[in-house]
Amino acid sequence: MAAFDLDFTLQQGEFRLAFSVNVEARALALFGASGSGKTSALEAVAGLRTPQRGRIAVNGRLLFDSDRRVNTSVRSRRTGYVPQDILLFPHLNVRENVVYGLREGNRPDLRVLVELLELATLMDRRVASLSGGERQRVAMARALYSGPDVLLLDEPLAAVDLPRRRRIVDALLGIRDELSVPLIYVTHLPEEALTVADWAVLIDNGRIVASGPPRDVMPAD
Amino acid sequence: MTAEIRDIAIFTTVAALAATAVMLVPGVAIAWLLARRRFPGKAIVETVVSLPLVMPPVATGLMLLWLFSRRGPLGALFDRIGIEIVFTPAAVVIAMSVMGLPLLIRTARAGFEQVTRRYEQIAETLGAGPWRVFSTVTLPLATRNILAGAMLGFSRALGEFGATIVVAGSIPGRTRTLAVGIYSFTETGQDRQAAILLVISVSIAFVAVLASNRMAREA
Amino acid sequence: MTLLLRWLVLAACLALAPRADAQGRGASNRQVVVSAAVSLTEVLQQLAPAYQAKTGDRLVLNLGASNTLARQISFGAGADLFISADEAQMNAVAAYIDPATRVDLLANQLAIAVPDDRPRTMMSARDLLDPAIRRIAIGDPAAVPAGVYARQYLQTIGIWSDVASKLVPAGSVRLALMAVESGAADAGIVYHTDVATAAHAREALLIPSTNGPRIVYPAAVVRAGKNPEGGRRLLAFLGSPDAIAVFTRAGFIAPVPVRN
């Protein structure tokens, strides 16, 4: 369980996002059409975008507060971030990618991660030779190995073909339950939201139009 | 090939290598700054860095001569500690570095700009500080382009003439490079020696540019 | 800073100096192209307006080291008149000139110049052996006339091998002078007439023609020129009393004394 205290506005050129979620949950799903602002919201939590106004705190840890002029640097935020295009370091192999984020403090055991994300056979492979699903799992391991307070995922199933999506969903559940790492993830697929999240937020055109348990928020089939 | 010609070829190659070594760290640093940072006066820095590319090399040589001659600002300092620059091999290396630097910076900067900033952002989310991001992500991903730029700088240094002859002269056995030697031999009617130096210069330059282009293509 | 500006201007002039073969057609009778040793720069610039006023012909000056000019002529450059600082370079282009027009126009003397912030007078050229003189600028002794004369003189007085390691060969006598003016060279062997043109150099020693090499400037009309008649006219003018007065005032010896 994590306390998500996310209340900010983000403006970039014409686009404006007003985001407000204050809830205790284990996994938070951001749901919406492309262009609605969900990726921007994720980036704001990671520190890659700076809101004009507002407050971002996870589990009591303050990451951003415009009133108190707090803006924690990206590297101090202890957020794990997996972007939609994954971005594994092309010049490093799988193992080197995973262990890149060496940080002191609580960190999952590498063996546990490797087992959970089924990476045992991949560790010495070059990044370029991996499939979409394999990259996704490696990226998740990399983000987790740095011992983040929260894991941010942008469309974790997007790069994975249908039959293998189950694996990723199982991995997400494992991260949520066995590793107890809070999740915020962006998705446009209802199945993900229903299985993994215990709170969902529907964003449309820069505004939150619905916020609640996934069943209540999902658009009618 | 006489001993004199062999010595000229060796001296030029060694000087060009030294010049490449001299320009490498400042060149990469400036290239990174121009690629990644905004700062007041950036346009001026960009312009100054490009000047040796655009100015007549003789003019660049004259500026160096003024700077490093006994009466010049830097030359006076060196003179006080008993170091001569003008008309010495050091002047050759300096002239070569100044002329090659803009090419290195241009190529390295493009290399850094090609490294998508997002890799650096990911590294930051994983807790890496600025130096770690630079040394473990940015630099390795830009290495090929930096090497290509260094090779280009080396080629330029090899062929450097205008600035070199002004600030280093054409002193046989001390500052006579391939390019300067070709000129001097031609001027004094020693056409055969000039022709040999010409062939050597073209060969070295050909190989260097070929290697540089291949490296940049594979980047 | 003025020194730097002078160099920049000279560099620009050297870069932009009209090549002797770059003439437009139809300019023939009004233009005379002179390839002349660079030490004649000031005197020819002085004489040009008077000459134009008198004859209507415009002088186009192509100035450089005589060996450079000779190379240009041997490649077919169409100068009308060639004035060389030594006989060797004139001999080198014998096939390209009209031998009937060849005449010894001027004589000159060597001098040792020093930078004006370290002025000194020398008792003899042997002072060049002084360890305080670390660099001596001369024209390239392989072919630049001033350099050849310098080498001959140093060999004559027996110090050539001793100073050889201190020599900085330059592309022309004026470039050697510049090296002295900038302080890059501690001394230079140039023509006596050059020192007067320098803002930042002084004459430490004059080497009179009785001691030094015989320095003679032959002149001849070039066959490939577009205006040979103009060349002949100019040559005649340069031997006239008016021209001789200008040469003498600048420090040249004219007319050339008979060889003894």
Image (cartoon, coloured by chain):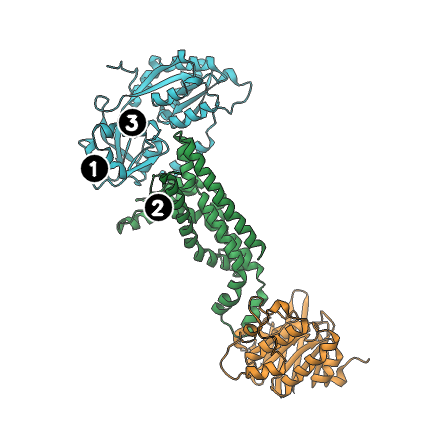
Residue type marked 3: Tyr
* Front position in the image: A175 or C15: A175
Q: Residues within 10 Å of mark 2 (few under 14, many from 20)?
A: many
Q: Position of residue C237 (x, y in %)?
A: 39, 14
Q: Is residue C45 visible?
A: yes
Residue on which disc 3 sits:
C149
Residue plotted at (57% across, 78% down): A79
Residue type marked 1: Leu
Q: Position of residue C44 (x, y in %)?
A: 38, 22
Quarter of the image with the C terminus of chain C in it: top left
Residue plotted at (43% across, 38% down): B197
Q: Are marks 1 and 2 in contact (CB under 8 Å)?
A: no
SS at badge 1: helix
Labels 1 and 2 share a subunit: no
Labels 3 and 1 share a subunit: yes
The first of marks 3 and 1 along the sequence is 1
The colour chain A appears in is: orange
Residue on which disc 2 sits:
B89
* Image position of C143 (left or right of A117): left
Q: Position of residue C54 (x, y in %)?
A: 43, 14
Chain for disc number 2:
B
Chain for disc number 1:
C
C-alpha distance separating marks 3 and 1: 18 Å
Chain drawn green, letter? B
SS at badge 2: helix
Chain drawn cyan, letter? C
